[in-house]
Amino acid sequence: MDSAVAHDNGKPVFYKRDIQLSRLVADRLEVDGLPFTVFYVATNDGIIYKLVEWYNRDGEEHSNLVDIFEATTPEPIRSMEISSKHKSLYISSDSFIRQFDVVMCKGRYDNCLRCIQDPYCGWDKDHNECKPYVTGLLQDVTNATPGICDSSVKNKPLHVYWGQSVHLACPVHLPQAETAMIGSSRWFRYSREKGKYEVQQRRDKYIYTQDQGLVILSVTERDSGRYDCKLGPNTLCSYNITVDTKTCSAPTDVEYRKVYSDWCHEFEKYKMAMKTWQNKQQKCQLAHPNDVAYQGSPPL
């Protein structure tokens, strides 16, 4: 062979720079009449890339990276086999052998978006957990239904005070599998004046955090409303902010004099305590540092 082997369908199932792929096994399954091929690709540093390939009705090939997990890190994977009968993936390195269940749902995916992309799994929206797929669970391996998980995302009410800074956390575990295929998450706001629009980062107002969160500085009544964190067309987190605009009123002359009088009395107590401590300190300094006071019966 003196030439490169061409890809099926003219494109690779998966491509990533700066990694060395060493082993490959595949499993085939059919879900609701649609066939899928699941590839497990090993790297020389013990990482497994889990890929799904399928064909649409027009015969066009599509693929998606659904998961990345450590198998023998940092050792390289020497051998890898899959058993369709036992639904298990067997991996060995120089030091040990590991067995993985190919149906890794509840223990692997903690949110709807990741769960529905694995053909072995489906999302139970009634119990908010990922389960082995059966009819009736949410699943969208082919990305045919944008926003399918939105109904499973609860809108969290948040009551804040005028001038306060607030952190909208979005603790959804998003490994490289998600961000590499769809892009980074973005925050959107819904208002009566502008409708839905993207929240742009500003040092003096909006700050994006590394965990998909959003910090809003010095909120005012204009910041009230709904905020959604989205990854592609899918919603990850949702908040509804209500800003309490009540502020402290200026004290009256009587209230001011009373508070001032109370503060003066406290300050006088502090000065008296300070003077007593200084007097005791001076008495202690008059004694010789090597003097030892002994009280008790004389020695026999």
Image: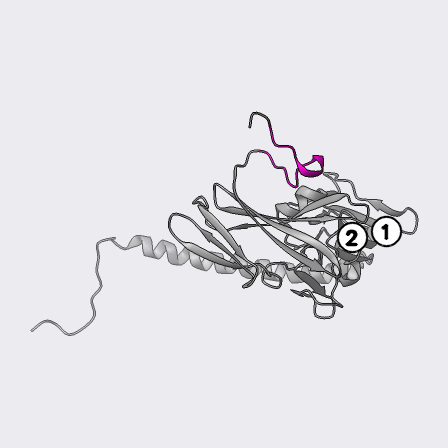
Numbered disc 1: secondary structure = strand
Neighbor class of circle 2 (other Cα within 10 Å; few <14, some 14-19, many 20+) is many
Q: Is residue 4 above or below residue 187?
A: above
Front-most of residues 289 and 179: 179
Q: Which residues are magenta?
A: 4-17
Q: The residue under label 1 is which amino acid type? A: Tyr
What is the magenta segment's predominant secondary structure? loop
Residue 34 painted magenta = no
* Residue labelled with disc 2: 228
Q: Is residue 213 above or below residue 105?
A: above
Q: For the view shown, which residue lies furthest in the right direction?
A: 193
Q: Is residue 251 visible?
A: no
Where's residue 195, x and y in %?
Answer: 90, 49
Neighbor class of circle 1 (other Cα within 10 Å; few <14, some 14-19, many 20+) is some
Residue drawn where x is 40% and y is 53% of the image: 96
Left or right: 16 with respect to 56? left
Residue 11 painted magenta = yes
Where's residue 118, x and y in %?
Answer: 67, 56
Q: Are marks 1 and 2 in contact (CB under 8 Å)?
A: yes
Where, by quadrant of the figure, is residue 256 drawn?
bottom right
Where's residue 298, x and y in %?
Answer: 12, 72
Q: The residue under label 2 is which amino acid type? A: Asp
Numbered disc 2: secondary structure = strand
Where's residue 40, x and y in %?
Answer: 57, 49
Q: For the view shown, which residue lies furthest in the top direction?
A: 2
* Residue labelled with disc 1: 190
Where, by quadrant of the figure, is residue 134 drawn?
bottom right
Residue drawn where x is 54% and y is 36% of the image: 19
Mark 1 or mark 2, earlier in chain: 1
Q: Distance between the Cα atoms at labels 1 and 2?
A: 8 Å
